[in-house]
Amino acid sequence: MTLPFTLLIDPEPADSPRTDFVDTFHEIDSGAPALRVAELSTQRGDGIFETLSVVDGRPHEVEPHINRLVNSAQICDLPVPNPAQWRAAIAYAVERIPGEGELALKFVLSRGVEHGPAPTAWLHATRAADFRAVRENGITVITLDRGYPRGVAEQAPWLLMGAKTLSYAVNMAALREAKRRGADDTIFLTHDGYVMEGPTSSVVLRIDGRYLTPAPSGAILHGTTQQSMFEFLEANGAATEYRDITVDELRAADAAWLVSSVRLAVAVTELDGEAFPHDTELTRALNEALLDRTKA
């Protein structure tokens, strides 16, 4: 099967007793019309998504991605996805896409069409971008104020900050701002100076030999690849920790990475225009381990 590969899905309720979902999957030509004009994913960004990596035919972190999709649906008052159906859809796609190289598999659940009877769901697989250079050489990063104080997600849950929604306009604007300032990427800060995450990544720091990431909360997604990174570090005797991290701690760290499902771990080599310490050998080891994951 050539790429891209697109699969429309008839969503099953979370409590459906079905075990065979093949008749709910509909392969379509990726260039063919698929969504209606009234689809709320495109009209309002009213939906959620996940993107997982498929390396040499092996999908990575399937369960963490499905669990996060379920959590996002609950936050957004969407029909809760049926995990068994999504596992089957991922397996169905993986059997039909190339079994070598690095691929990105995105799956989406939207509220459907306005006043429509059911949500819309689909899965789309493409060849991943070539991230070998940034994995090896690192990236330059700026910090940007996200405009919220720490704790805003708990104070204003209607902002949906803990959900991975399709509303990525702000995230993309932050990346464009980084480019305008001559940098590659961004680390968001709360208005009162705490580290959050990148627009498309988790943040991991090393301070005094300990590896830290901001505690997952209503405002910060629990990164699937960050969890795999911590598992690797712990297996090699390193100490890891989830906690609130100030911007001053970020600036004083002896290494930092932005971590995501497809790009994997990239070292920060410059922060806000200043050279930043980085660990090239550990970054290589991390990415080798992340590429070799077999745990679904």
Image (cartoon, helix red, strand yellow):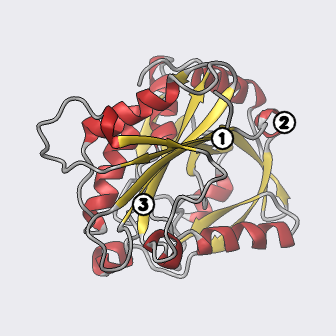
Q: Position of residue 151 (x, y in %)?
A: 36, 73
Figure quadrant of residue 98: top right
Q: Position of residue 99 (x, y in %)?
A: 62, 19
Which residue is at the far right?
A: 182
- What's the CA distance linking mark 3 and mark 2? 30 Å
Left or right: 238, with 269 as reference point = left
Viewer-side label of 3, 2: 3
Q: Residues within 10 Å of mark 1 (few under 14, many from 20)?
A: some
For numbered disc 3, what is the local secondary structure? strand
Earlier in the chain: of badge 2 and badge 1, it is: 1
Quarter of the image with the N terminus is: top right
- Placement of 98 over or under 188, stated as above or below: above
- Placement of 292 over or under 156, stated as above or below: above
Instruction: Tell me the amino acid under the disc marked 2.
Output: Ala
Which disc, if any, is residue 133? 2
- Placement of 107 over or under 114, stated as above or below: above
Q: Residues within 10 Å of mark 3 (few under 14, many from 20)?
A: many
Instruction: Tell me the amino acid under the disc marked 1.
Output: Pro
The residue wearing badge 1 is: 4
- Placement of 211 over or under 91, stated as above or below: below
User: Does residue 61 appear anywhere in the picture?
Assistant: no
Quarter of the image with the C terminus is: top left
Q: Position of residue 38 (x, y in %)?
A: 46, 77
Please state which of residues 264 and 75 is positioned toward the viewer in this rendering.
75
Q: Residue at x 60, y 55 (%)?
A: 200
Q: Residue at x 28, y 65 (%)?
A: 75
Residues at marks 2 and 1 touching, judged by CB atoms closer than 8 Å: no
User: Does residue 250 appear anywhere in the picture?
Assistant: yes
Instruction: Tell me the amino acid under the disc marked 3.
Output: Ile
The residue wearing badge 3 is: 48
- What's the CA distance linking mark 2 and mark 1? 24 Å
Viewer-side label of 2, 1: 1
